[in-house]
Amino acid sequence: MSETKKVTHKKDSLAPALAISAALHLVLVIALLVGADFGKTATPTPKAGSTIDATVIDPAVVNAQAQKIRQQRAQAKQEEAERLKRLEQQAQRLEQQREQEEQRLREVKRQKLEAERQAREEKKRLAEQKAQAEEQARIAREKAQQAERERQRKLEEKRQAELAAEQAEKARQQKLAEQRKAEEAAKKAEAERQRKLAERKKAEEEARKAEQARQEAERKAEEAKRRQQEQEAALNDLFSGLESEASQRQSARGQFIQDEVARYGAIFTQMIQQRLLVDDGLTGQECVVNMRLSPTGLLLDVKEKAGNTRLCRATKTAVVSVSQFPMPDDGDIIAKLREIELTVRPN
């Protein structure tokens, strides 16, 4: 900015010098023109057709006038020479001033060109400096952006690591919970297996005792039957009058057997319902199954006859889970219970 002002100031200082030089040259030209006109002597031209009067002229007067004219011409010539000398001197001064002015103008021009060159170099330097500053700023921005991206990347990696650790901890806790649940289920299953094993052993022991009791009862019954047959012949006549009473006893026994079968059927149904595993959606449904048992109450077969499919599937599973059913000592009741039909409903 300062260099530009300096060049402008130099341009302004050239204007007066140029004006003075032009004025001096103009004065010199005018003086030369005037001197040339003044040096010429006007010669009168006689008018055509004019009358010439003859006059007597005194030679002394003529000589005096001629002398005067010569003196005037000499003086004019001297004055003209002096004037020309002054003009020449003035022209020399003006030439010197012109040369000095031209030298000054050349110097001014050189200084102007130098100032312009320096201004261009300064402008170039400033442009390069600006470009360098902008490049440095760009590099700094890129570094800052790269640093920010790196910071964001590290934050994201940290967040991902924390998330992975959290998920791993959740997975570990879930695995531990599942393991505890599996262990508890295994313990329950083992306890259930031990309970069923104990129940089966108990049922087998009861069945064994029941079988022994049945066999003993059959033996005693056979013995009693044999003794009865031995006595029948002798007592035929004795009991002939009691036929009506025997018929009544037979009818009462049939009712007793029917009631016992119904009672044992209710016991069997209750045992099955205790082992039944169903949801509330099967409430109000029923399943009819047919069971075939051994004389000791051991389950031989179970078949689905009618009812809800899901409930019947759960009922068959519960029947197999019971597997051993209690049996009475009466052989007639056992015969009825060995193939029995039950209707199971969820409690």
Image (spheres, grey):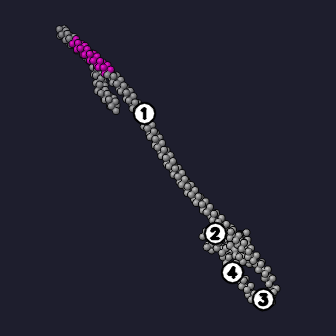
Outermost residue toward the right in this view: 233
Number of numbered tags placed on the structure image: 4
Task: Kindly report the distance in space between the C-alpha atoms of the residues bearing marks 3 and 4.
Answer: 29 Å
The image quarter containing residue 180 is bottom right
Element under disc 2: loop
Residue nearest the viewer, comparing 80 with 142:
142
Residue beneath the point at 22% across and 11% down = 74
Amino acid on which disc 4 is placed = Asp
Amino acid on which disc 3 is placed = Phe
Q: Work out whether mark 2 precedes mark 4 in sequence or the reverse, and give the earlier one.
A: 4
Element under disc 1: helix
In terms of secondary structure, what is the magenta stretch mainly? helix
Structural crowding at the residue carrying mark 1, measured as other residues with C-alpha within 10 Å and reported as few (<14), some (14–19) or many (≥20): few
Residue corresponding to mark 3 = 239
Residue nearest the viewer, comparing 250 with 4:
250
* Mark identifier at residue 259: 4
Q: Single out the mark in the foreground, 1 or 3.
A: 3
**Residue 132 percent across, percent down from the top left:** 42, 33
Residue 165 drawn above or below residue 301: above
* Stretch in magenta: 74-103
Structural crowding at the residue carrying mark 2, measured as other residues with C-alpha within 10 Å and reported as few (<14), some (14–19) or many (≥20): some
Residue beneath the point at 40% across and 32% down = 129
Residue corresponding to mark 2 = 275
Task: Kindly report the distance in space between the C-alpha atoms of the residues bearing marks 3 and 2.
Answer: 51 Å
Amino acid on which disc 2 is placed = Arg
Amino acid on which disc 1 is placed = Gln
**Residue 160 percent across, percent down from the top left:** 51, 48
Residue beneath the point at 50% across and 46% down = 157
Inspect the magenta stretch and tell me whether residue 85 lies in it: yes
